[in-house]
Amino acid sequence: MEKILITGAIGQIGSELTMALRERYGKENVIATDIRMPTDVDLRDQGPFEFLDCLDPHHITRVMQIYQVDTIYHLAAILSAVGEAKPNQAWMVNVNGLYNILEAARQYHCALFVPSSIGAFGRSTPKDKTPQDTIQRPDTMYGVSKVTGELICDYYHKRFGLDSRGVRFPGLISYETEPGGGTTDYAVEIFFEALKHKKYTCYLKEDTSLDMMYMPDAITAMIQLMEADPSRLKHRNAFNVTAMNFTPAQLAEEIRKHIPEFEIEYSVDPIRQEIADSWPNSLDDSAAREEWGWNPKYSMAALTKDMLDKITERIELPSEQKSR
Ligand SMILES: NC(=O)c1ccc[n+]([C@@H]2O[C@H](COP(=O)([O-])OP(=O)(O)OC[C@H]3O[C@@H](n4cnc5c(N)ncnc54)[C@H](O)[C@@H]3O)[C@@H](O)[C@H]2O)c1
């Protein structure tokens, strides 16, 4: 029976991954951990929760012993925009925290999932259909820490036989939990603002093209990769994965099909714009498709409809707006 530990379980990905893994493997077999206490009742009460700082190696191994963990999804991290404001903390959590998790996984013979990001690419990377194996010279602390993470996970596989696996996620879009301070957060905020105020001020330029993915596809990717036949995996860590590609202007146009009065304005944040400009326009995810059958379901149109429907159910709106 699998015993799964999730770090950073209260974050944008972790909160949904925890529920999906509990559904699949049984509530008692999925241990959610974070340095924040969960406010979500389901996450807190439906299965074990532990306070766990990934910068504390002794506490990591203690929790692993108590629960006899054999698989780790390591999601604790500092994201791109916060990482530029706090580079020291980004290095500590994203590199030293990962190192502590790798050592614990090696010691206790655990399988390990670690997500990388499109942020692991930089200005000198080919921008369109960015290949799986290519130039990676990012100039943000987030990017530097993500490339370091990809390399050290590959090293632990090669040197110690650790079963480490990972993907490079594009921007992730979801409605359950607020995003944690990344450059693609606009693609979440825009839906809430469109429904609440029919207006959104975007911090990226209208023609900034980035790859994106809806959270249900991201959850499928993680579970599918961790369950994949290891003999088929040539890359192991940091598979490019993507589902769709759009600019803020194109997403606004799609939202207007549902909310015709929706207006978008632009007030560019130079820091997040610079980060976005250094990332690929689009990714080539053929290695993930060939090696473990990656095949996303949600297009921009399907994502837009589902986000608007789900958020409408959640937020309090005047009744005439609900009947849109
Ligand atoms: N969300 C995206 O769009 C996206 C895209 C690409 C890659 N990723 C990667 O996926 C992973 C998870 O991202 P997310 O969006 O869920 O992030 P998030 O910011 O929403 O969540 C991260 C969680 O880590 C926790 N954390 C921070 N420091 C910690 C520490 N020292 N010990 C333990 N926990 C700590 C935070 O409390 C938070 O709940 C990260 O590695 C991120 O780089 C995310």
Image (cartoon, rainbow, N blue to C red):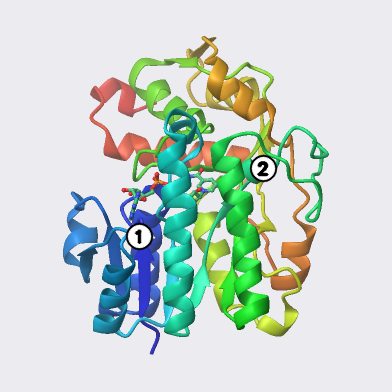
In the displayed structure, does residue 70 sit left or right of residue 320? right
Q: Which mark is residue 222?
A: none
The numbered mark, 1 or 2, whose residue comes first in the sequence reads 1
Snapshot quadrant of residue 124: top right
Residue on which disc 1 sits: 54
Q: Is residue 211 visible?
A: yes
Question: Residue drawn at (24%, 22%), measured in percent from left and top?
Answer: 318
The image quadrant where one finds the N terminus is bottom left
Q: Is residue 200 left or right of residue 296?
A: left
Q: Is residue 40 left or right of residue 127?
A: left
Q: Mark 1 or mark 2, which is nearer to you?
A: 1
As measured in the structure, the alpha-carbon distance from the residue carrying label 1 to the one carrying label 2 is 32 Å
Q: Does dot 1 land on a helix, a strand or a loop?
A: loop
Q: Residue at x 51, y 31 (%)?
A: 187
Residue 248: quarter of image: top right
Dot 1 amino acid type: Cys
Under 8 Å from ligand 1: the CB of mark 1?
Answer: yes
Residue 297 in sight from this viewpoint: no
Return the residue at label 2: 244
138 or 170, nearer to the observer: 138
Q: Position of residue 319 (x, y in %)?
A: 25, 25
Say which residue appears at 21% left-offset and 53% top-offset.
Answer: 38
Circle 2 crowding by C-alpha within 10 Å: few under 14, some 14–19, many from 20: many
Which residue type carries mark 2?
Met
Residue 272: horizontal and vertical position, in percent?
Answer: 55, 24
Residue 178, image x, y percentages? 35, 38
